[in-house]
Image (cartoon, rainbow, N blue to C red):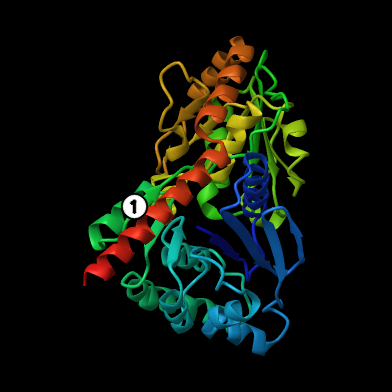
Amino acid sequence: MKIAYIYYLYATPSIGVLNKTQDQNLSLIKSGNKTIDIFVLNTEKSGKDGNLTYIKIPDFKQNLYYALSYVFFKYRYLGKKLDLMKYDAVIMRSAGYDATFLHFIKSHNTFLELHGFGDIEAELKLSYQSSIKNAFRKIIKKILIYQYRMFFRKSLDHLKGVVTVSEDVNNFIESNTKLPSLVVPNGIFIDDKISRGFCPLTDQNLKILMVIGRPDVWHGIDRLYFSALRFAAENTDHTIEIHIIGSVKPNDIHFYKETKNVKIKLLGAKQQSEIPILACQFNIAVAPLCLYRKKLNRTSAIKVSEYIKMGIPFVIGYEDFALKYAVKEDCFFLRVPNNEDLMDFRKIFEFAYSVSKNRDRVIDRMRGYAQTYLDWSKILEQYSQFVEKSTLSKERMISKI
């Protein structure tokens, strides 16, 4: 069986998503998997590398024609760019829905990869983007939300199955459809490089790393900052530095005011190879803290798997599927409630001191956990088996009819 795994990135993609496609490709090459071909339609580059093919598409921001095409006819354009006749099935990473999507999935054995509730996420972004002056862009975003709700429901009758990293999404699929579904964590490419780990905390100066693609509100930069402020006001002999890697600008953290004890430093976007080198300079990292804002609590963020691979312990504000097999001895993360309450930084300092005392052991456990449970080559093999089984089951049902 041959599977086309498609990322349709008609808007500027996050660094995390691009890194994910590269890790998946390297894992497919290393394992010798010839079943899956990955296609990334994007506005920046073309080219082929192993199982990964980049296809450059016009930037919808360039003119009105492209914008309207992507809003109303995006999957017609996809059909022109890809010859999918040689593939037995298609895995489509969710990229919005319109009338042409229904035609597309009726023409192919299509499996949808879902990471959350797209309409809720889009509305959330729109509500926090009050500074957008372009009324046309706001209208476009509202149309996309409307189309999502209309055509997503209709598409469920024609899909062959759903792959998701979220147990919340999986529960929705199981409750509202009869579609087969597969829940997997976000994985990583397992190479032979030694994990650099983290810097042990030996004083009262905590250095925190946060790696994000964009300054989306569910990352919880504000929650982290205000929690640190409250702690610092009561513990003036402690300092907290929050270092953020990603496409974040000063106006994205407009609430921030530098104080003697709490500082936020923006490091900008970095190449994937640079992040582990920087990460080893910090005591702990932070995963998303406010996923409740987009009505998620059980899902999987790319950065969690990357933190585990790098060997840097982290604070997390939800139940990540990548940690499904973690046991008490896997003390490399601290979970805090997934809500708007300020976090108790005393517990965060205690966590940092605890992992620092057993630094080498913690790093080894994280590396072992990544190799056992988060290897993309193993996860993508699950994709292949799920797609083949679900496709054959549908064909048997049709033949009986």
Three-letter residue code for mark 1: Asn
Is residue 194 among what the camera can see?
yes
Residue 116 at x, y = what percent? 43, 57
- In the visual, does 172 lie left or right of 100? left
Q: Find residue 381 and report its horizontal and vertical position in percent.
A: 50, 44
Residue 361 lies in quadrant: top right
Residue 360: x, y in percent?
64, 13
Image coordinates of residue 88 in percent, x first then y, are 49, 65
Please state the total of marks drawn on the protein image.
1
Q: What residue is shown at x 49% (from left), y 66% (from top)? A: 122
Q: Residue furthest bottom?
A: 65
Residue at image point 29% right, 63% down? 396
* Residue nearest the viewer, comparing 299 with 74: 74
Let me know if residue 214 appears in the view.
Answer: no
The residue drawn where x is 70% and y is 20% is: 199
Q: Nearer the viewer, residue 243 or 31?
A: 31
Looking at the image, which residue is at 60% across and 47% down?
A: 33
- What residue is shown with label 1? 170
Vertical side of 158 occupied by 268: above or below: above
Q: Residue furthest front?
A: 399
Q: Nearer the viewer, residue 152 or 119?
A: 152
- Corner quadrant of residue 336: top left
Q: Secondary structure at mark 1?
A: helix
Quadrant assignment for the C terminus: bottom left
The answer to whether 126 appears left or right of 169 in the picture is: right
- Judge the density around disc 1: few (<14), some (14-19), many (≥20) Cα neighbours within 10 Å: many
Q: Given the current orientation, which residue lies at the most extreme top position?
A: 357
In this rendering, position of residue 160 left or right of residue 329: left
**In the depicted structure, whether residue 345 falls above or below residue 328:** below
Residue 122, relative to residue 100: is it above or below? above
